[in-house]
Image (cartoon, rainbow, N blue to C red):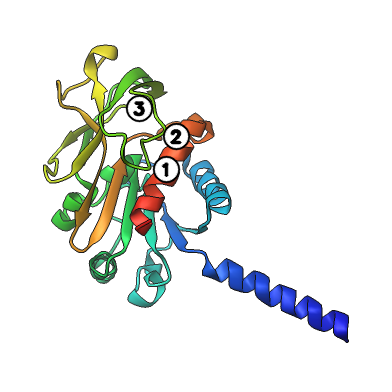
Amino acid sequence: MLRLSVLMLLTMANVMCSDAQPRVLVFSKTTGFRHDNIEKGAETIKQLGATHGFTVDHTEDASLFTDENLKQYRAVVFLSTTGTILDDQQKAAFMRYIQAGNGFVGIHAASDTEYEWPWYGKLVGGYFLSHPQVQHADIHVVDKSHPATKHLPDVWNRKDEWYDFKDLNDEVTLLMRLDETSYQGGKMGDYHPMSWYHEYDGGRAFYTALGHTKESFDEPAFQQHIVGAIHYAMGN
């Protein structure tokens, strides 16, 4: 009987510890192009959460965007979402979630999402316009004070799909810009942002254009980039 009671107490303690961790929702619904790295990316973020002190749920069910469900999460990650993914009620719930002081992280095709929703466009910070073929390029890390970039070299050479953007929000803080002289096909010139963050409508928003390839999610530097983004979005 005593042994059973001890086991029950240990189980309850483990549950309480798990519940004490901040929760993050990874959302990857697509109604346009679908990246083949989504499942790998979601699993990687779950593993990173287990290592770095946050619990991760992954869904593509937009009906979970309600006030009641979202309030359990400190941040929501849009992982290469595309197209129109939320209806009007779900959009309203997500807006209230951000306005309540919570956080958003957009990864890669999160900028190829909700083109007809101006509030979201300002939140994510810009919309996808085009990209050349996947290739190596140099990223200049212009701000290393942020947890998503403090571990990176001044010039980070890596292989990815390099987005061009339109409708950029000029109120964001730039973290990384792309050197268009280091690859072929860029369309933005000297100012080609790749990652940024800002406080927005009561909450916090972070975006990185990186993460097209499956291999990205195996890179320790990219993994730490995502961890830092999530910690920022959670308010840490």
Q: Is residue 42 left or right of residue 182?
A: right
Residue positioned 38% across, 77% down in the render: 68
Where does the image place residue 189, in percent across and percent down from the top left? 14, 21
Amino acid type indicated by mark 3: Glu
The local secondary structure at tag 1 comes to helix
Residue positioned 80% across, 83% down in the render: 5
What count of labels does the image hold?
A: 3
Query: Earlier along the polypeptide chain: callout 2 or callout 3?
Result: 3
Residue 196 - label: none
Quarter-wise, where is residue 91 in the image? bottom left
Write down the residue under mark 2: 222
Q: Residue furthest front?
A: 145
Write down the residue under mark 3: 161
Where does the image place residue 216, in percent across and percent down from the top left? 47, 32
In the image, is residue 220 above or below residue 146?
A: above
Q: If the image is split into quadrants, where does the C terminus sit?
A: bottom left
Where does the image place residue 156, in percent across and percent down from the top left? 37, 22
Q: Is residue 102 left or right of residue 7?
A: left
Amino acid type indicated by mark 1: Ile
The local secondary structure at tag 3 comes to loop
Query: Earlier along the polypeptide chain: callout 3 or callout 1?
Result: 3
Q: Is residue 101 left or right of residue 13?
A: left
State the separation of the CA atoms marked 3 and 1.
17 Å
Q: Are marks 2 and 1 in contact (CB under 8 Å)?
A: yes
Residue positioned 79% across, 76% down in the render: 7
Q: Residue furthest bottom?
A: 1
- Foreground mark, 2 or 3, reads 2
Write down the residue under mark 1: 226
Circle 1 packing at 10 Å, graded few (<14), some (14-19), many (20+), is: many
Amino acid type indicated by mark 2: Phe
